[in-house]
Image (spheres, grey):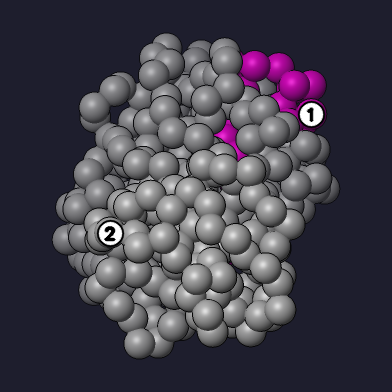
């Protein structure tokens, strides 16, 4: 769980630029590539295979697998069929994503391909399609799923539908991939629309690491892929800094932190939500032991709002040094220092809190 990926659109770029991007992604630990065969134009079969094979060899050299996005029209151009996936193996691809489904039975037949290719199904549409495939007994380890991305504003799927689809995929034990969008200038996708390229509409325009942290926080997404090319090196680095399985909140600081407050915020032994979860706050209490001898003077003790991050000051005696994340608005009697708050667009992450979950912060 927790792989990162990039996307490439060779028909809109150059081989040299794609290879540079692959090398950079490999440097930051990215593990997969989504690339599109849906708009290869009028090229000859041999030229298509040669160009993609060259790119895929570079990807493999840097530790990335490659899944090709295909449709029935691509099968025709390459002379492939559900009984013959050899053209994709000629490219040395690791799998194919079926942008358009067949009838369920053909997908199952493809899962038995002797080339060993993975068959990736569309996770964003009616889950009954995937259920139909699984009910016909494919080779289970060869079936994976991936959501769509949406170039037009306001066309991305809702979180409700996303969660519903993912729950259905997980009933079948399937891996799920989803897309996030780079905000770097001059990015592009497969089509001439550049309004962001994400799976969830709520992610459009958000910092890329916030998008990644949200998808991993759902614990239903195995792979997160940057849909548009090319993300900046800073964005790749930010994505790579996310720890899957650890609930990471962005925090906007409201004051200059003391050395003690900063040490508590970024507690090296990790924050853990107490098992006796309150409806008003999540508590990290190990810090009150680690910093029991440190002075924490009152500072910025305003009343508390949902999403505030606070540290208990000297006024709380034996509890001083605890770190809380506020879940409900409440008064502050002066014994809690508000060190910052979670940005509004990240408050959704509070929906994923659970007793004993490990969490942390990244300054935004």
Q: CA distance from mark 2 to mark 1?
A: 53 Å
- Quadrant assignment, res 170: bottom left
Q: Which residue is mark 1?
A: 20
Q: How many marks?
A: 2
Viewer-nearest residue: 346 or 98: 346
Q: Is residue 299 above or below residue 328?
A: above
Q: Residues within 10 Å of mark 1 (few under 14, many from 20)?
A: few
- The picture places residue 337, in percent across and down from the top left corner, at 49, 57
Would residue 314 be found to the left or right of residue 291 on screen? left
Q: Is residue 290 left or right of residue 130?
A: right
User: What kind of element bears circle 1?
Assistant: helix
Residue at horizontal 30 percent and vertical 36 percent from the top: 201
Q: Residue at x 57, y 43 (%)?
A: 255
Q: Could you tell whether 350 is left or right of 75 in the image?
A: left
Check if residue 362 falls in the magenta segment: no
Q: How many other residues sit within 10 Å of disc 2, few (<14), some (14-19) or many (≥20)?
A: few
Displayed quadrant of residue 120: bottom left
- Relative vertical location of residue 175 with respect to residue 11 in this rendering, above or below: below
* Residue 69 is at least partly visible in this image: no
On the rendered image, what quadrant is the N terminus found in? Answer: bottom right
Question: Residue 243: x percent and y percent?
Answer: 61, 61
Residue labelled with disc 2: 331
Disc sitting over residue 98 in the figure:
none
Residue at screen point 44% across, 33% down = 206
- In magenta, the rendered stretch is 1-21
User: In terms of sequence position, does the residue under pointer 2 or pointer 1 come before the other?
Assistant: 1
């Amino acid at each position: 769980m927790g792989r990162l990926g990039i996307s490439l659109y060779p028909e809109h770029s150059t081989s040299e630029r794609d290879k540079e991007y692959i090398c950079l992604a490999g440097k930051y630990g990215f593990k997969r590539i989504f690339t599109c065969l849906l708009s290869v134009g009028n090229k000859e079969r041999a030229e298509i295979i040669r160009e993609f094979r060259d790119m895929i060899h570079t990807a493999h050299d840097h530790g990335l697998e490659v899944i090709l996005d295909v449709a029935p029209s691509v099968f025709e151009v390459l002379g492939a069929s559900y009984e013959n996936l050899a053209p994709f193996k000629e490219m040395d691809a690791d799998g194919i994503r079926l942008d358009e489904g067949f009838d369920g039975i053909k997908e199952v037949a493809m899962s038995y391909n002797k080339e060993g290719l993975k068959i990736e199904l569309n996770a964003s549409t009616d889950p009954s399609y995937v259920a139909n495939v699984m009910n016909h007994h494919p080779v289970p380890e060869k079936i994976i799923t991936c959501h769509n991305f949406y170039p037009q504003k306001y066309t991305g799927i809702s979180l409700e539908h996303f969660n519903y689809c993912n729950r259905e995929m997980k009933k079948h034990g399937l891996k799920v991939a989803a897309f996030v969008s780079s905000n770097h200038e001059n990015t592009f996708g497969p089509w001439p629309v550049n309004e962001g390229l994400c799976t969830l509409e709520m992610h459009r325009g958000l910092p890329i690491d916030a998008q990644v942290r949200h998808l991993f926080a759902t614990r239903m997404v195995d792979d997160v892929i940057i849909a548009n090319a090319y993300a900046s090196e800073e964005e790749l680095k930010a994505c790579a800094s996310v720890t899957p399985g650890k609930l990471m909140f962005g925090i906007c600081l409201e004051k200059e932190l003391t050395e003690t407050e900063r040490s508590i915020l970024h507690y090296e032994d990790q924050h853990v939500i107490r098992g006796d979860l309150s409806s008003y706050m999540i508590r990290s209490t190990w810090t009150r032991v680690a910093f029991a001898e440190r002075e924490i003077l009152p500072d910025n003790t305003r009343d508390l709002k949902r999403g505030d991050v606070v540290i208990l000051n000297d006024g709380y005696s034996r509890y001083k040094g605890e770190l809380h994340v506020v879940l409900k608005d409440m008064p502050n009697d002066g014994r809690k220092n508000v060190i910052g708050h979670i940005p509004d667009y990240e408050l959704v992450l509070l929906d994923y809190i659970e007793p004993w979950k490990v969490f942390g912060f990244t300054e935004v």
